[in-house]
Image (cartoon, grey):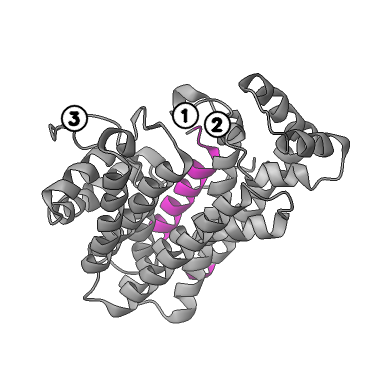
């Protein structure tokens, strides 16, 4: 995949994300403390802050990519990261609401190398905790109507994308264009919203906010493509999920749909096997080979590069602060070269 040119003074992705967590996490913890005890306990467990009994742990929490996008977009627009903290917290809350629900819908057993919240606290409680986090996100930025309206619209779009993703599992006629639209809503919408909120917090003009939104959306599509590749070929030791996990659940991810619609022999065999009533774990490696043989693995990698180029052009139109621009490109490279 294409390597981005990053300015020499740019921080590493690890440094950028550590800085972001240092800025946003205290406010995120303060916000979560506003939840009722029952919801707070589940949210804190899901976020990796404590165990099921509420005792603090030094576990692996989220990377806080979306919070970093908010803060850096604010700086890139010529503003101050401090003015974007509330938006960063709200975006992280919406993201984690979606993860709690996603784990339930997909039946995922683990997240970040430990049992998912629904397995520990039950489906109903995990779902309600997600709902509470979504409502809390709205409260966090209620004082800024433009930001609150954009975030609410994003949450609706995200749910629509998730609904399409679920519906695709029971369809045999999913097209690549509608699958891309699903990914744009399910993943791209929130990354676009994160960057747009950063621009808004800096007082950027509507045209500039739109470019920040496009940067995030294009980055989101690249992110989803990489995530889809990891869902098939990722190493369980780093992803925290079983190998071929997306194939086991017959997800119509972008590489799968690209293979199914390829029109070649490998794609046709994949379609027959995906439609089979019996699919054993021993069949999964062959399904992955068929996707590769159909050219979908290479297609996905090329699309990652395409979306990254489009994202970079959008950012270059509006980035006013060189250091923040460099950090955003560092994050983009991290997202598209990650192994988990």
Place of residue 317 in the rendered image (x, y in percent of width and height, measured from the top left)? 53, 69
How far separated are the C-alphas under marks 1 and 3? 21 Å
* Horizontal relation, residue 265 to residue 121: left or right: right
Secondary structure beneath disc 2? helix
Query: Is residue 285 positioned above or below 245 on the image?
Result: above
Q: Residues within 10 Å of mark 2 (few under 14, many from 20)?
A: some
Name which residue lies at 13% across and 35% down.
54
**Cα–Cα gap, marks 2 and 1:** 7 Å
Determine contact: label 2, label 1, CB under 8 Å: yes
Q: Is residue 323 shown in magenta? A: yes
Which residue in the structure is indicated by mark 2? 245
Which is more toward the observer, 117 or 87?
117
- Secondary structure beneath dot 3 equals loop
Number of marks: 3
Query: What predominant SS class does the magenta segment belong to?
Result: helix
Write down the quadrant of residue 135 in the picture. bottom left
Q: Earlier in the sequence, mark 1 or mark 3?
A: 3
Q: Is residue 105 left or right of residue 116?
A: right
> Which residue is labeled 1 in the image?
241
Rendered location of residue 337, percent (x, y): 54, 38
- Residue bearing the label numbered 3: 57
Quadrant the N terminus occupies: top right
User: Which x, y percent locates residue 323?
Assistant: 39, 55
In the image, the segment drawn in magenta is 317-339
The answer to whether 245 is drawn above or below residue 253 in the figure is above
Secondary element under disc 1, as helix, strand or loop, is: loop
Q: Is residue 41 rendered magenta in the image?
A: no
Measure the alpha-carbon separation of dots 3 and 2. Answer: 28 Å
Which image quadrant is residue 312 in?
bottom right
Question: Is 270 or 289 nearer to us in this picture?
Answer: 270
């Amino acid at each position: 995949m294409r390597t981005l040119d990053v300015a020499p003074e740019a921080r590493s992705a690890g440094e950028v994300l550590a800085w972001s967590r240092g800025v946003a996490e205290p406010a995120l913890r303060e916000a979560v403390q506003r939840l009722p005890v029952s919801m707070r306990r589940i949210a804190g467990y899901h976020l990796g802050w404590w165990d099921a009994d509420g005792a603090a742990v030094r576990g692996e929490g989220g990377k806080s990519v979306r919070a970093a996008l908010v803060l850096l977009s604010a700086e890139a627009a010529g503003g101050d990261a401090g003015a974007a903290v509330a938006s960063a917290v709200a975006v992280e809350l919406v993201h984690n609401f979606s993860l709690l629900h996603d784990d339930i819908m997909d039946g995922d057993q683990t997240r970040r190398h430990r049992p998912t919240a629904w397995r520990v606290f039950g489906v109903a409680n995990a779902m309600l905790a997600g709902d509470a986090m979504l409502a809390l996100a709205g409260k966090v930025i209620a004082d800024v109507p433009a930001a609150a309206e954009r975030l609410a619209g994003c949450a609706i779009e995200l749910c629509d994308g998730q609904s399409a993703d679920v519906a695709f599992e029971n369809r045999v006629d999913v097209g690549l264009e509608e699958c891309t639209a699903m990914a744009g809503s399910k993943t791209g919408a929130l990354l676009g919203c994160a960057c747009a909120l950063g621009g808004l917090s800096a007082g950027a003009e509507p045209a500039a906010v739109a470019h920040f939104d496009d940067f995030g959306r294009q980055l989101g599509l690249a992110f989803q493509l990489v995530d889809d590749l990891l869902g098939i070929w990722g190493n369980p030791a780093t992803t925290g999920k079983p190998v071929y996990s997306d194939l086991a659940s017959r997800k119509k991810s972008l590489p799968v749909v690209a293979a199914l619609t390829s029109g070649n022999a490998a794609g046709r065999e994949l379609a027959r096997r995906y439609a089979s009533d019996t699919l054993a774990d021993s069949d999964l490696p062959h399904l992955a080979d068929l996707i590769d043989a159909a050219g979908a693995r290479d297609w996905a990698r090329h699309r990652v590069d395409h979306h990254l180029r489009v994202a970079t052009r959008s950012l270059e139109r509006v980035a006013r602060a060189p250091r923040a621009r460099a950090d955003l490109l560092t994050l983009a490279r991290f997202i598209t070269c990650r192994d988990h």
